[in-house]
Amino acid sequence: MNSTVADLMRRNLLDVFNEPDAERRDAAIAVTYAEDVVWHEPDRVHRGRAALARRAAEVLAQSPDWEMRPDGPVSVNDDLGHLAFQYGPAGRPPVVTGMDIAHCRDGVIVELYTFVSVSDSGRPS
């Protein structure tokens, strides 16, 4: 699969971090990230697809009725992608806003940086 940077950014948000079905999420992970992907969260770093998959499952389990929503279009600059997002209960204002910035190479994400801001209404449980 020859994915564009914009495709990868949307898949990262919607097909991985918004997908409750583990089988579909694992399939998306396999085509979205390099085997040795490095994901930087504000408080930790994950190395490899397996670590990323474990953390994605944790995020989904923490707030199963929440959803990720793009907050604007994907921006692309050469091999870098940026996508702002909102996260919170389905159909309600977001509790978390943030952005993902990814370095892509050969049709996969090789490095991902996630930045988040939590609203005054609280943190994910």
Image (tube, grey):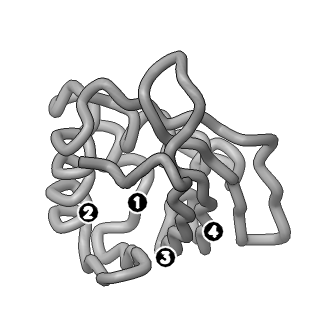
- Front residue (pair 78, 53): 53
Name the amino acid type tagged 4.
Ile
The residue drawn where x is 18% and y is 67% is: 51
Residue designated by label 3: 111
Q: Amino acid at mark 1?
A: Tyr
Between 27 and 52, the one nearer to me in the picture: 52
Badge 3: few (under 14), some or many (20 or more) residues near its Cα, within 10 Å? Answer: many
Question: Does dot 4 land on a helix, a strand or a loop?
Answer: strand
Report how far apart the C-alphas of labels 4 and 3 lie in the structure.
8 Å
Dot 4: within a 10 Å radius of its alpha carbon, few (fewer than 14), some, or many (20 or more) residues?
A: many
Tell me if label 4 and label 2 are in contact, CB under 8 Å: no
Question: Where residue 88 appears, x then y in whole percent?
Answer: 46, 36
Q: Between disc 3 and disc 2, whose residue precedes? A: 2
Q: Which residue lies under the disc numbered 1? A: 33
- The alpha-carbon separation of the residues under discs 3 and 2 comes to 11 Å
Residue at point 17% right, 30% down? 23
Which residue does the numbered mark 2 point to in the structure image? 52
Instruction: Write the residue at 16% across / 33% down.
Output: 22
Sequence-first disc among 4 and 2:
2
Q: Is mark 4 in CB contact (under 8 Å) with mark 3?
A: no
Judged from the image, the secondary structure of the residue bearing numbered disc 1 is strand
- Which mark is first along the chain, 3 or 1? 1
Of marks 4 and 3, which one's residue comes earlier in the chain?
4
Image depth: mark 2 or mark 1 in front: 2
The foreground one among 12 and 85 is 85
- For marks 4 and 1, give the CA distance: 13 Å
Q: Is residue 66 left or right of residue 71?
A: left
Look at discs 4 and 1 and give the one toward the viewer.
4
Question: Does 119 sit left or right of 25 as displayed?
Answer: right
